[in-house]
Structures are given as structure tokens and as C-alpha cells.
Image (cartoon, coloured by chain):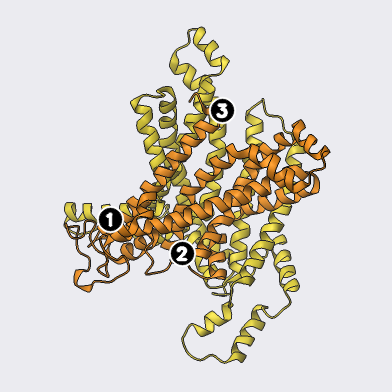
Amino acid sequence: MISAAVFADQIAMYNPEVNDFAAMLQAPSLDHIFGTDEFGRDIYSRIVHGARTAMLVGFTAAICGSTLGLLVGVTSAYFGGWVDITVQRVIDVLIAFPSIILALAIVIILGRGVGPVIVAITIPLIPNCARVVRSSALAIREIPYVDAARAMGFGHARIVLRHISPNIMAPYLIMLTTFLGQAILAEASLSYLGLGVQEPTPAWGLMLKSGAEEYAESAPWAVIFPGVAISLAVFGFNLFGDAMRDVLDPKLRDR
Amino acid sequence: MYKYAIKRILLMIPTLIGAGLLVFMLMRMIPGDVCEIRLGGTGLMVDKEQIEICRDSLGLNQSMAKQFYDFAVGIATLEFGDSMWTGRPVTEEIAIRFQLTLQIAIMATLTAVIIALPFGVISAIKQNTWMDYCIRVFSIAGIATPSFWLGIMIILGLLIASQHLFGEPWMMPIEYTPIWEDPLANLSQTIWPAVAVGYRYAAVVVRMTRSAMLEVLREDYVRTARAKGLFEKVIINQHALKNALLPVITLVGIEFAFLIGGLVVTEQVFNLNGLGKLFVDAVLDHDFTLTQALVMMVVAVFVVVNLLVDLIYAWVDPRIHYS
């Protein structure tokens, strides 16, 4: 999938954004192996280029969500007291808040397009990572080397970033890989609702929206292939996440 | 235990206040308002004076502090007000849709539990066999498949199958019929979204059941039970499953609470007029009162279910003592 995104220009057979009204809703054939959509665009080429959108949104949202979650979680655990209590209450609110509505409001406020979609997907991911990371950071905080760093006069930022955070890489990486699949699914959902990436940019959720509404019965290939692409991508990332968890979580090594 | 329960109940208050503040601010940050959409929606030139009259009547010209105060007092006294878009009481708007969403959430939960428990247990007992691998693929695929796409595939499958079997395509009814009025019409509409959502839900529960069972099966008391010569069936049902069910109950509770406000895209696919669709319409229409009430309801359901799950957990499992 990463290869498809990187080499999309070489792998794709047609320009994914150019309409061809002489080839509308054609069934899969040698010319168009996944068929064409209602504008005559090659579905295979749009899926290959759609991988770029999925990768861009998926990786950016997952990395930003888990990194910000790491910083929030470690800071909350490190300072403790009222900082921890306040941060935990904010996290409670964000976790309880319906994420699709939060994403919807953010997209409407910031406008439609890839950037706002990434922000809309990232924000609900932060509290989930922060909560997991905080519990690990609470244990690390009690280890003597943190006291030693403090005794040596290091600042809070240095202790948080250089001494505690690197020791919480296992839960961080596990959350990051879990978020990849979630972010791709969220992007597809938002695009399907018409609130994500906009036409003519190729995006899998958007392809389902246009294909599903009117042509599902007469041109089922327009809805089958983009859905398969989403499922396979998320399936792959989930397997990767599971493998990562098995390697990094000592409790799961025997399972 | 009582102290913990009281502390948890008190902690719900800041969460609810925070959620109220967040939805209040988010809605006011969205450009435009309900009056502009309602009056400008006809495409005609709208008199600014009319928009101002509309804003005055809905209280949108009041200061933010006054608007938030009214909203907070309304929530505290359970007076949610009228929808800014339809003018009907918010409780009425929600009640009509709640029935449908609740029914699908219950049916999806039943589907998930019926599939997930046996699959999760078999997967754990037959660890690293072909059955385990098949069930694991089934569950990872369930998490990877978007529910809304599965919904589209179900609709497509029904259309094609009915065309072949009966000569004409069959579509599920669009109008909601309560189950006590016509169970067949009701189920023919609700079973499909329940299956579409239930598959993902089942996949999540299978993984948790498998993981919890594997942990419990390695416990000393299971080894003791085996050493006593008990039948494997008794060990699984009486000793292992009962204890492994605790995290599963937690997960089922949390997923159920999520479904009350999280069926947005699936409802869109099946053209269902449930809470998810109401949510999207309310946000897009800038209907502040309705969106605020919906968010508060979903957040309240979420925190109450979480609290109940935690308390049940502590009550059922003697090893857990909250302080």
C-alpha cells in the first residue's frame, strides 16, 4: 500500500482526475481493470492515487495524535497534583464527547479539504493515547533516575522529553500503529459524509459516496473496489499493529 | 466501595460541564447561524432586518454568557427547549429517533455477543490451530471493514439476490414501524444495519474474549480444576468463562454506549431517521439547542454506562477493591 502511494504515478494507468465521458460506468475490462465511474474515470487509477490520500491522512493523524497524546500523558503524570487532575478531566470530556460530531464541527469550522480532515481526526485520538501513556508514565516517574535528573538540576522539559518519554516508547508505538487503521477508517467515513476530502481528489471514502448513491446496482464495481481497498489497508495496518504489540508487550509474548 | 461510587458520581459533574462548554463553544465557532440558513436557504435576497428579528426570537443576540447560563440552567432542570430549526420541543425530536437507534444498538449488541462469545472461546481453546487462525482473520477483517461499506454491500446483495429469486429487486422499507405494531416490517428494516454494525462490534468482542480466556486458562485454579479431573467442558464454562467475561462485559457496555451516538454513517447508508442522522442534520443546520441537547444526552449515557460497568466490575470480581 505504501508502494502504491509512493509510485502512484507509475502504477496508475490513467490520470485519476480526468473525466472521459465516452467511457462512463464501464464494467471491468482489460482497458479498465476495475471499471470506470460515472465520469468515466478509471477506478483502478483512482484507488492507487487514493492510497496517497489515505497514507497522508492516516500517517499524519496517527503520528500527530499519538505524539501529542504522549506529551500530554507524560506531562500530566510528571507534574501530578492539580495539573494531572485538570488534564484528566479534559481527557474525560474528550473521550466522552461523540468523536464523529467533534470531527464534523471541526471540518465545518476549518473548511473542507485534507488539512482540516487531519485536524478533525487527530484531536479525538489525543486523549486515548494520553490516557494509556499516563499510566505507564506514572510508574516511570517513581524510578530513581528521574529523581537523579531532577537533582542534577535538569529542567522539567528536559526530564519529560529526554528521560521519561523515551521509556514509554512501547505503548506509544502500539497506539501509533492502532491509530493508523482508525485514521484511515475515519477519513473514509468523513469523506463518505461529504465532509472530508473534496472532488476531484481521489479518496476511497469519496469514491464510495459518489458510486454508492446512484450506481450501486448498475455499476457495483464502483462501490466494491474502493471498499476492498479501505478494508485491505486497515487490515494490513491492524496486523502490523498486532505484531508490534506482540513484540513490545512482554505480557503478550507467549500468546 | 460506596466512597468510590460517590467519588465517581461526583466526577461525572465536571465531565458533563466540560462537554457542555465544548459543544457550546464549537457550535458558536461554526460560521453562520440557523437564521441565515433558514431564511437564506430559499436563494432569495433576505432582508437583514428579518434575520435580526429571527435572531432576537431565538435569543442569538444575547451575550455569550447569558446564552451559556440559559443552556446550563436548561440542562440542570432538564428543560432542553425547542429546536431552533423545527420549533418543536427538543425532547420530542429526540424521542422519535431514539427508539430506532436504541433498537439497532440492542440488536447489534445481541448479534455481536451471539457471534463473539463462542468464537472467542473456541479461538482461545484451540489456540494456534486452523480454527484459531480463521477466527482471528474473521475478527481482524471485522475491525478493518468499514460498517458503512458493509451496509452498502448488504443492500447490493439484497437487490441482486431478490432480482434473481423473485424477478424484481427488493428494497428494505424506509418508513420506521415500531416492532409491536408490525414485527416483520420492523425487522426487515432494522436487521440489516444491526448486522452491518454488529460484525465490527463482534470482531472487537471476539478479540477481547479470546485474550481474556487465554489469560484465565493459564491461571493456577484452572490447572487445579484440571488436576481434580474435572471435565474440560465444566472447566471452560464454570471456571474460565465466568472470570474471563468481566473485561468482555466492560467492552460490551462501552461499545453499546458508543452506538447510541455513533451510528451516524450507517444510518446515512440505510437512510434511517435515527439519532445519528439527527445529529448530522442538527450540526449542519446550526441548530444549537438540538445539538447541545444531543451531545449532553450522548455524553451522559457514556459516563453513566462507564460508571455502571466499573461498579458491576467491582461488585462481580472480589479481587477488585476501589478506594
Which amino acid, by three-letter code, is at mark 2? Answer: Gly
Residue in view at x 35 percent, y 59 percent: A49
Q: Where is residue A121 in the image (x, y as percent from the top left)?
A: 53, 57
Look at the picture and state if B3 lies above or below B285: above
Expressed as whole percent of the image width and height from the top left, the position of residue B63 reads 74, 77
Q: Name the residue under label 3.
A: A250
Residue at mark 1 = B156
| Mark 3 crowdedness (10 Å alpha carbons): few <14, some 14-19, many ≥20 | few
Q: What residue type is labelled 1?
A: Leu
Picture coordinates of residue A240, whole percent (x, y): 44, 39
Disc nearest the viewer among 2 and 3 = 3
Does B184 sit left or right of B286 as displayed? left
Host chain of mark 3: A
Between A2 and B119, the one nearer to me in the picture: A2
Q: Nearer the viewer, residue B35 or A13?
A: A13
Q: Distance between the residues labelled 2 and 3?
A: 39 Å
| Image-based side of A220 in relation to B294, left or right | left
> Could you say whether the residue bearing mark 1 is in a helix, strand or loop?
helix
Give the residue displayed 80% in from the left and 45% down from the top.
A81
> Would residue B301 be seen by someone viewing this image from the given angle?
no
Q: Which chain carries label 1?
A: B
Residue A196 has which mark?
2
Apparent colour of chain A:
orange
Crowd tier of the residue under label 1, counting other residues whose Cα lies within 10 Å: few below 14, some 14–19, many 20 or above: many
| Residue A84 coordinates in the image, percent (x, y) | 75, 46
Nearest to viewer (mark 1 / mark 3): 3
